Image (cartoon, rainbow, N blue to C red):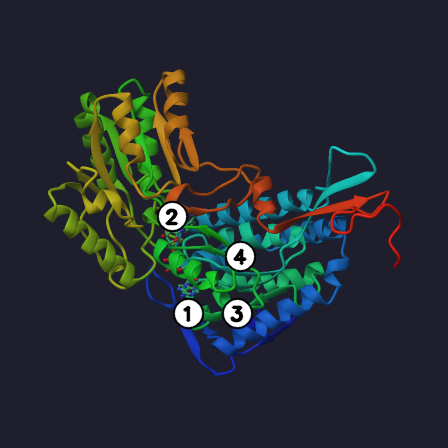
Amino acid sequence: MAYEHMTELFINGKRQGSSSGEIRNVLHPADAHLVATFHEAGASDTVAAIDAARHAFDSGHWGSFTGEQRGKILERVADILERDKELFAKAESEDTAKRLVEAQYDIADVISVFKYFSTLAPQNHDREVDPGRQNVRSTMTSEPIGVIAMITPWNYPLLQASWKMAPAIAAGCTFVIKPSELTPSTTSMMMDVFSEAGLPTGVANLVLGSGAVAGGPMSTHPGVDMVSFTGSLATGKRLMINAAETVKRVALELGGKNPNIIFADADLDAAIDNALTAVFLHSGQVCSAGARLLVERKIHEQVVTEIARRADLIRLGGATDPDAETGSLISAAHRDKVERYVADALSEGAILRAGGMRPEGAQFENGFFYRPTVLDNCTTEMHCVQDESFGPILTVEVFDTEDEAIKLGNDTIFGLAGAVWTSDSDKAQRVARQLRHGTIWINDYHPYVAQAEWGGFKQSGNGRELGEAGLAEYLEHKHIWQNLAPAPSQWFVPTKGKVDV
Ligand code: NAD
């Protein structure tokens, strides 16, 4: 498929420009070349998209699809993505500047997500409840929530979108999705995939553009039943406040400041190697990045010296540079933020052990590159330990005991992910169970599977994506009580005989 209209909005089954005629140029972050010029939706376009999704949900056609039929559509989506995976990987890599090989992994993960939810869609979740009396049938059943407003970030554009779109379709919802204005390509291409897979008109709708304008009605419009958001804490809070006015369901996947805990009895070769991947993969622009290294005091110097040495050797480059190990940051504004963050950390007393600057060389001049950076001598009260940088920055703290490691690991407003490195399996399990984060890896970092729920404790969000709970997010639960032998209750008009009616 050519995906030739991907720069346009997709409303009620049709590609169209924005009503205002406004446009936005999307630039490649590694060298600032023009990727494409996209139509920029105004609020009225978003309202039209919500109306289309509302109509598709309320009109009955989509509602008449069985779980098996919805599952078949998801299977076809996975097949089309498999056919076109190289086109998708290339587009994802162009928008984000992530290495092509990483974009290829992402698209493979997206395919797994659609396949997984295709198997959940046909499952019947009805449950008979014992009502504790005779002649009553009491059934718990579930139904799609309705119209979902989906808002997604720029770091894993299609992967984050798939965690919402696949379960929403499996559940029988309709939706309007707004990808980040920085990385709209692959989410837009999906609209053509859905059409080819036979998704009925109006079930999937797409608006492109800024959060403030195109995204505005998504959390306020009464036609939306649920807001499903992945992005920053600040935006998540704003959406939650907006959604309160009409009591929408709100699912939030927000930031993290994730502890990576290395005990002295760990396999240090593996721990050090994975500590680098944990934080520097995709230049640290990963919500679950292991940006906070907690290391036992007696191995601190050994571990930090080696991490810093290897960090200095990491090769930066463009997305298709075969020698590059990581790429640029997403934008000039984001690199400015990362630079300020490092400057503030140093003024708070952090010690620079690696990086702390832009790379030198003509090939980096037009992109938004920043060197992998290691900040030692950090403590929990410092901003650099508490605030998410979302860049290639590792902060280092030390601990002496297991209890202290747990206390430090939980000393954050976030609760998304973390890891424990030790050769003592009992200790690993003890620590893992006491850390208040949604995912804990033991002697590993980053892997996840579509069957296991993903999400945050505390201010990393609410609700879960993936797994069975990831489908349940898009379902309302209904209790049906059927009296099989109706009789007067005689509560208000106690009579001896039958009441005249
Ligand atoms: P962001 O909050 O700036 O933007 C996210 C999306 O929200 C974008 O599409 C943006 O246009 C939109 N938006 C902004 N203001 C809006 C408004 N008022 N109304 C409607 N939409 C609005 O976040 P970002 O910079 O794109 O993403 C980075 C953040 O995402 C980081 O904090 C990261 O930790 C988080 N993240 C979390 C997860 C997770 O699974 N928990 C995954 C990926 C990213």
Q: Which residue is mark 1?
A: 210
| Residue type highlighted by circle 2 | Pro
Ligand 1 closer than 8 Å to the CB at disc 2?
Answer: no
Q: Mark 1 vs mark 3: which is more N-terminal?
A: 1
Q: Secondary structure at mark 1?
A: loop
Q: Mark 4 vs mark 3: which is more N-terminal?
A: 4
Quarter of the picture containing the N terminus is bottom right
Q: Which residue is mark 2?
A: 322
Ligand 1 closer than 8 Å to the CB at disc 3?
Answer: no
Q: Disc 1 to disc 4, how far (Cα)?
A: 23 Å
Q: Secondary structure at mark 4?
A: helix
Q: Which residue is mark 4?
A: 88
Looking at the picture, does residue 377 appear above or below residue 158? above
| Residue type highlighted by circle 3 | His
Q: Disc 2 to disc 4, how far (Cα)?
A: 19 Å
| Residue type highlighted by circle 1 | Ser
Identify the residue at horizontal 38%, vertical 43% (top origin).
458
- Pointers 2 and 4 in contact (C-beta within 8 Å): no
Q: Nearer the viewer, mark 4 or mark 3?
A: 3
- Pointers 1 and 2 in contact (C-beta within 8 Å): no
Ligand 1 closer than 8 Å to the CB at disc 4?
Answer: no
Circle 1 packing at 10 Å, graded few (<14), some (14-19), many (20+), is some
**Residue 76 horizontal/vertical position (percent):** 69, 53
Looking at the picture, does residue 491 appear above or below residue 201? above
Q: Secondary structure at mark 2?
A: loop
Q: Mark 2 vs mark 3: which is more N-terminal?
A: 3
Q: Disc 1 to disc 2, how far (Cα)?
A: 34 Å
Ligand 1 closer than 8 Å to the CB at disc 1?
Answer: yes
Q: Secondary structure at mark 3?
A: loop
**Residue 239 horizontal/vertical position (percent):** 43, 61
**Is residue 157 shown left or right of residue 167?**
left
Q: Which residue is mark 3?
A: 221
